[in-house]
Image (cartoon, rainbow, N blue to C red):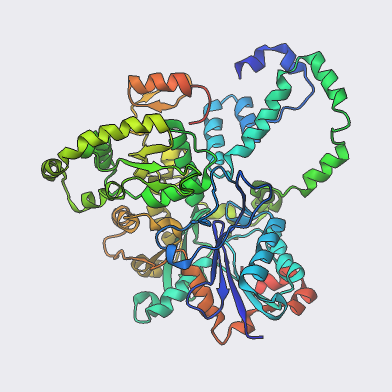
Amino acid sequence: MSNVVVLDNGGGLLKAGAGGDLDPSVIIPNCLYRPLSAKKWLHPSPISISTTATAATEPSSDLDLTSASVRRPIDRGYLINPDLQRDIWSHLFTSLLHVNPSNSSLLLTEPLFTLPSIQRATDELVFEDFNFASLYVSDSPSLVHFYEASRRPTSLLSRAQCSLVVDCGFSFTHAAPVFQNFTLNYAVKRIDLGGKALTNYLKELVSYRALNVMDETFIMDDVKERLCFVSLNVPRDLQIARKSGKENFFRCTYVLPDGVSYTRGFVKNPDDAKRYLSLSDEKVSSPSLGVKKDVIELDVSEKTEDKKRIDLTKNEFDLTNERFLVPEMIFHPADLGMNQAGLAECIVRAVNSCHPHLHPVLYESIVLTGGSTLFHNFAERLEKELRPLVPDECQVKITTQEDPILGSWRGGSLLASSPSFEAMCVTKAEYEELGSARCRKRFLH
Amino acid sequence: MDDDSTNPFRRMSSRTRKVAPKMVAALASSDNRTQAALARLEALENDNAGVEVVENIDDEDASLDDDDQAYIKRQSKGTKRKTRQAKALEAKKAPKTFMELLHEANLESLPPHVPSYLKAAVGPPSSTSRRHFCTVCGFAASYTCIRCGIRFCSSRCQNIHNDTRCLKFVA
């Protein structure tokens, strides 16, 4: 019984593969969808790993996902629809991974503070529906810590066996202190905002200002991943976004799929879309703007022509301030009307709930993980907001993972290949003997 | 929404209207603005914006009928209508929402030192006050709509707001 299936069952993406591998062999959106052309709910096809760094949710290339409706087994991060999850898992195990559950172990990630009823449903799914030989349940912060600690054995994080994992995923955002590979759950703080809410917020803004995209979950996910970024200076960027023509560094056009010549939306002028990058280097942009203008002057007439075409065809829209106001909500949920503190304050509160001896170490080993941290400038902005809130004598050091989406899976894979893994699992026999609640005690949740 | 309270016929109908639960709360509460804001936050977690719309459409369908017509229609539809048992079965089959599960778990009853989902929430912000962005164009908004409380930045945006969104409770 050597093979271990490592399954990071995220609300947005499901990452699965064999324990010990470097990368998961399958990444699929954890949902079923129904495009307009189909009558049945379909399984999304797997995403190739090479694309995850640039665009996380890229469904199958040939299928037109315009106005596709979605069913997700996970709501607000927690498994609420075990029947749907069973469908997705059985597709995963039989058609994609080709494993036989009855002679393999499962390492499963579960969000922090999973309700007992949901834990019971998960155990039933694993042992009774799929007949796995044994199960180990872990949470994503401890796996991310485990991975980072083993990857950089000389770092402070590894020597102190202590880190603060900021997991900004699809459903919510957690700031979780980890100590000796255990998440200190009394100190974990959560913001109820993740990638899903951001996509929906972008949908709402575009639908009101340009054209109705309320049904276009997959397209707007793509728009968010390609075009949104985190602003380092919101008032300045708002000023720039107000300008017209080429002085506006943020304006860019996204073309919606038309279903005939292309089934995937795209950014009209990718160079335009990247112009904000030049901005972040310059402290004050006004003097250099004059220089830029000369170079670009000749395009202006073409630009007005473009605008005319927007009105005619109605299948593309412009984004300006939406590009940075959407990720901005993670830093200031209050702007949305949520009564929750922003990410920087969330981290400070999580650290303050720990023992004072840990504070300096935690601030110095902050690890960012989760797909929503992929926004450009996310770490820089976080450091900028965090520094004033942290005591002077502490250093702030934020580490970004090389692939934040896969962070916890890789940790899980590493853990599954460690020699003591077998002993940590709960076997099917133990489950049948003791029941779900007793077995759970072993995982110390 | 105002029509509802003034029109006596609407009131007398025994049919329960199918409206999203948060929206019902928003309409029933005296403090509509905060309720509407909550409903909107709830909507940010929706998977499909379309699902609710479908519900509303068949709801409107029914509410358009006059009272007597509705009666005839109900009889003619009789065979298609689901029995109460079937409905109850369907309700059982439908997965519970996370909020229902959370309510069932009764986390409030745990002793205060036990960490739980509720206690892990980060809590209200301390220092920074809310920044307001114009709901029409997205820039800093200095004015508030006197009817619905939504923000806008200029008279141009105010006009757009009044024409499209005022009192519709979608911020």
Where, quadrant-wise, is the N terminus of chain B in this rendering? top right
Whole-percent x, y for residue B141 in the image = 34, 29
Q: How many marks?
A: 0
Judge left or right: residue A354 versus residue A248.
Answer: right
Whole-percent x, y for residue A115 in the image = 65, 58
B120 in relation to A165, above or below = above
Query: Closer to the camera, A285 or A319?
Result: A319
Q: Identify the residue shown where x is 56% and y is 62%.
A: A28
Judge left or right: residue B128 versus residue A29.
Answer: left
A366 in relation to B35, above or below = below
Residue A420 visible, this angle: yes
Q: Which residue is situated farthest in the bottom direction here?
A: A419
Query: Closer to the camera, A292 or B148?
Result: A292
Query: Closer to the camera, A255 or A169?
Result: A255
Q: Identify the residue shown where x is 61% and y is 72%.
A: A97
B87 in relation to A279, above or below = above
A180 in relation to B152, above or below = below
Whole-percent x, y for residue A133 in the image = 71, 78
Whole-percent x, y for residue A422 in the image = 63, 84
Q: Which residue is situated farthest in the front direction here?
A: A261
Residue B135 visible, this angle: no
Q: Identify the residue shown where x is 69% and y is 77%.
A: A100
Query: Closer to the camera, A39 or B92?
Result: A39
